[in-house]
Image (tube, rainbow, N blue to C red):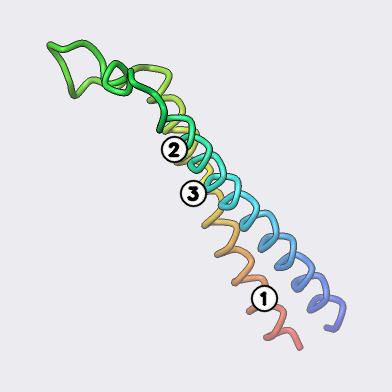
Amino acid sequence: MVVVSAVAFAAALLSFYFGARALRTRRAIEHLTRRAGRGRSDALARLGPADDPDRIPESDAAERRRDDVSIERGFVLLALGAVCALLGVLAL
């Protein structure tokens, strides 16, 4: 039983590490994007043509999908880490 508990705790630590890393990477990308966008005078040009202001350019849409996947991956890994830690405690 001690081996099962140790493996569960190791899996929990790895899940916590990679989950926190995925979320930290997402925040860093957002920070860099905000800093790069401050000095731009063509910020409105990124919204799309004047006839359709709700349109999102394809490159921005792809970036948002990638960022959303990073958030989901981070939270899922943190939840998996919590479950592994719980199983490790129960295995003791």
In the picture, measured across the screen, residue 43 lies left or right of residue 1, that is left
The alpha-carbon separation of the residues under discs 3 and 1 comes to: 20 Å
Which quadrant of the figure contains the C terminus?
bottom right
Label at residue 18? none
What amino acid is found at the position of numbered circle 1 in the picture?
A: Ala
Task: Determine whether the residue tagged by mark 1 lies in a helix, strand or loop.
Answer: helix
Tag 1 residue:
85
Which quadrant of the figure contains the N terminus?
bottom right
The alpha-carbon separation of the residues under discs 1 and 2 comes to: 36 Å
- Name the residue nearer the viewer: 40 or 83: 40
Q: Where does residue 40 sit, x and y in percent of width and height?
A: 39, 23
Task: Determine whether the residue tagged by mark 2 lies in a helix, strand or loop.
Answer: helix
Seen at 70% across and 68% down, the residue is 12
In the picture, measured across the screen, residue 77 lies left or right of residue 10, that is left
Task: Answer whether labels 3 and 2 touch (C-beta < 8 Å).
Answer: no
Label at residue 34? 2
Q: Where does residue 59 sit, x and y in percent of width and height?
A: 43, 19
82, above or below 19, in the image: below
Label at residue 72? 3
Task: Determine whether the residue tagged by mark 3 lies in a helix, strand or loop.
Answer: helix
